[in-house]
Amino acid sequence: MPVTLQVIYHKNDGATFDMDYYTGTHLPLAGAHFGQYVTGLTASSGLNGGAPDAPSPNHVIATLTFESMDKLGAAMEGAGHVLEDIPNFYSAAPQIMVGEVLG
């Protein structure tokens, strides 16, 4: 069964986020590491919170899709350098969600 790993970078408690670093350095680093394991990797920048005048609660949500939990596990075994890069662009701890693909 396919699963996703979502990494959510909230705009809470004054957390700072360096979009240039994220798009220019972190995304290529993540792509190079996770590319052999994933069937898809996307990152979405928050535009609004569901209404045009409502601010987005998130800087970015990254979604990585894997064929199985085994593939996710294999990808995470060597992902230390990707995770250690997070403080270079985000001043808080991201929220992580692993989910079963429903549709």
Image (spheres, rainbow, N blue to C red):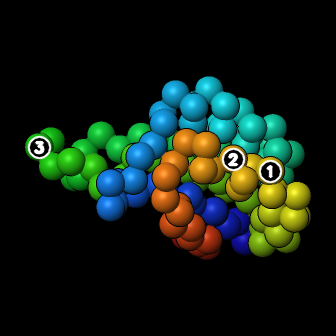
Q: Which residue is mark 1?
A: 81
Alpha-carbon span between mark 3 and mark 2: 33 Å
Q: Residue at x 33, y 60 (%)?
A: 12
**Contact between labelled residues 2 and 1, with CB atoms less than 8 Å apart:** yes
Could one spot residue 101 in this view of the protein?
no
- Tell me residue 70's x, y (percent): 85, 71
Q: Using the image, determine if residue 58 lies above or below residue 53.
A: below
The amino acid beneath tag 2 is Asp
Q: Using the image, determine if residue 68 lies above or below residue 62.
A: below
Which is nearer the N-term, disc 3 or disc 2?
3
Task: State left or right for residue 76 relative to residue 51.
Answer: right
Q: Residue at x 24, y 45 (%)?
A: 48
User: In which quarter of the view is residue 99 placed?
Assistant: bottom right
Which is nearer the N-term, disc 1 or disc 3?
3
At mark 2, the secondary structure is: loop
- Crowding near the residue tagged with mark 2, few <14, some 14–19, many ≥20 C-alpha atoms within 10 Å: some
- Tell me residue 47's x, y (percent): 30, 40
Out of 7 and 11, give the one closest to the viewer: 11
Could one spot residue 9 in this view of the protein?
yes
The amino acid beneath tag 1 is His
Alpha-carbon span between mark 1 and mark 2: 6 Å
Check residue 85 in the rendering and tell me which mark sits there, or answer none: 2
- Crowding near the residue tagged with mark 1, few <14, some 14–19, many ≥20 C-alpha atoms within 10 Å: few
- Tell me residue 61's x, y (percent): 48, 51
Q: Which residue is mark 3?
A: 53
